[in-house]
Amino acid sequence: MTGRTPHTLTWFARAFACVALAGCAESNAIFEAILEVPASDGDARYVAVDARRGETAIADGDYGLVHAPLDGGSTELSVEVVARDGDIGAPFRMRIAYCASPHCDGNDDATAPPELEITFDHAHYEGERTRWRATLPTIAATREASTPIELHVDRCQIEGCRSGEATSWCRNDGTHFCE
């Protein structure tokens, strides 16, 4: 062996590793919802959050993202939803349930917890971290569980890719600052 062989093998190993890693590279984007949950109205002592694309849960199980107690006053929750490759830019829904038990368990259809459903058209942008801040409405414990309150969040309400405060996160032509 010559003195150059180890260097050549090292170079080859590095080049192979770079190609292999590039083939496995995955794009991602992180969306954070900062939710101010008002004090409980009635039996709800917990709040649980779930996110879905279509009928597919983004987290494991029902209400798999966050479970938090409602302690008398308002509660601030930070919920992160990560999108990878084909899911970046895809719409998704976030369900927020006001529950009597920590994991919203023990409910049948007749006692399902009241829910708020938020639809996000476009909250993820490749390689970016975006956020949305909101104070959620109070949901009466007597509200029919089969009819969730629905909110729609337009992409221009999604904060990101620009510092400071803004009334809209889109340019005058309607494109988001992250596009």
Image: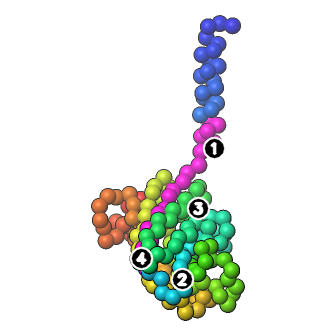
Q: Earlier in the sequence, mark 2 or mark 4?
A: 2
Residue 119 in view, yes or no: no
Indicate the quadrant where residue 10 lies: top right
Residue contact at pointers 1 and 4, CB within 8 angstroms: no
Q: Measure the C-alpha gap from mark 2 to mark 4.
A: 13 Å
Q: Position of residue 133 (x, y in %)?
A: 40, 70
| Residue at the spot 54% in from the left edge and 82% down from the top edge | 44
Residue 145 in view, yes or no: yes
Residue position marked by numbered label 4 in the rendering: 74
Amino acid at the residue labelled 3: Asp
Q: Measure the C-alpha gap from mark 3 to mark 1.
A: 17 Å
Mark 1, mark 4: which one is toward the viewer?
Answer: 4
Q: Residues within 10 Å of mark 3 (few under 14, many from 20)?
A: some
Q: Which mark is residue 87?
A: 3
Secondary structure beneath label 2: loop
Q: Residues within 10 Å of mark 1 (few under 14, many from 20)?
A: few
Task: Relative to 85, say whether 176 is above or below.
Answer: below
Amino acid at the residue labelled 4: Ser
Query: The N terminus is located in which quarter?
Result: top right
Task: Relative to 133, say whether 161 is above or below.
Answer: above
Q: Measure the C-alpha gap from mark 3 to mark 2.
A: 33 Å
Q: Earlier in the sequence, mark 1 or mark 4?
A: 1
Give the extent of the magenta segment.
Answer: 19-38
